[in-house]
């Protein structure tokens, strides 16, 4: 059975270590062969916009743009509907490959068989 990991990242530049951990765990799971879905919520919502990941800095951490690119290429990246709306982010604003979806989609993903969900 293929394993699936759903990672909800709530932190952005406001909590850089927690943010970096979420992206690192998600990409590590992807590299290990897991199906990965990353959810951008709260302050991490800004990383759905072009160029924002490049502004993120954390010493001794993998570059966030590289991690995001890997997740876009091999997994699913979703921006929370409400988080996007609160920040004035629309579908035409986000990086190609980022979808916008809400709680029903998140719940559907995490309730499926063989899924492990993590929240950072």
Image (spheres, rainbow, N blue to C red):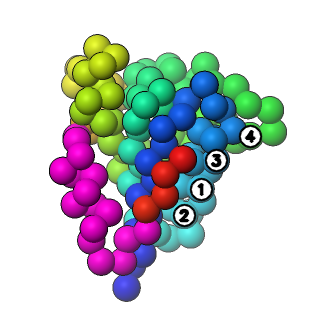
Q: Are marks 4 and 1 in contact (CB under 8 Å)?
A: no
Disc 4 secondary structure class: loop
Tag 4 or tag 3, which sits nearer the N-term? 3
- Which mark, by number, is residue 21? 3
Residue extending furthest right? 60
Query: Over which residues does the magenta segment extend?
Result: 101-116
* Residue 98 appears in the picture as rendered: no
User: Tag 3: Cα neighbours inside 10 Å, few (<14), some, or many (≥20)?
Assistant: some
Q: Residue tagged by mark 2?
A: 29
Disc 1 secondary structure class: helix
Residue at (53% x, 55% y) in the render: 26
- Which mark, by number, is residue 61? 4
Disc 2/disc 3 C-alpha distance (Å): 12 Å
Disc 3/disc 4 C-alpha distance (Å): 9 Å
Q: Are marks 3 and 1 in contact (CB under 8 Å)?
A: yes
Disc 4/disc 1 C-alpha distance (Å): 12 Å
* Residue 102 appears in the picture as rendered: yes
Residue 113 falls inside the magenta stretch: yes
Residue extending furthest top? 88
| Location of residue 15 in the rendering, given as x and y in whole percent from the top left corner | 63, 31
User: Tag 2: Cα neighbours inside 10 Å, few (<14), some, or many (≥20)?
Assistant: some
Decide which of 49, 42 is in the foreground and name it: 42
Q: Residue tagged by mark 1?
A: 25
| Location of residue 14 in the rendering, given as x and y in whole percent from the top left corner | 60, 25
- Up the image or down, 48 lies above or below 25; here it is above
Disc 4/disc 2 C-alpha distance (Å): 17 Å
Tag 3 or tag 2, which sits nearer the N-term? 3
Disc 3/disc 1 C-alpha distance (Å): 6 Å
């Amino acid at each position: 059975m293929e394993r699936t990991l759903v990672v909800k990242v709530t932190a952005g530049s406001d909590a850089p270590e927690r943010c970096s951990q979420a992206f690192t765990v998600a990409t590590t799971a992807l590299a290990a062969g897991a199906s990965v879905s990353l959810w951008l919520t709260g302050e991490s919502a800004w990383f759905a916009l072009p160029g924002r990941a490049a502004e993120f800095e954390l010493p001794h951490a993998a570059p966030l743009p590289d991690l995001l690119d890997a997740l876009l290429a091999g997994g699913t990246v979703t921006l929370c509907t409400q988080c996007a709306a609160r920040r004035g982010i629309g579908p035409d604003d986000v990086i190609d490959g980022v979808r916008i979806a809400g709680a029903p989609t998140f719940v559907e993903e995490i309730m499926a068989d063989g899924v492990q969900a993590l929240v950072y």
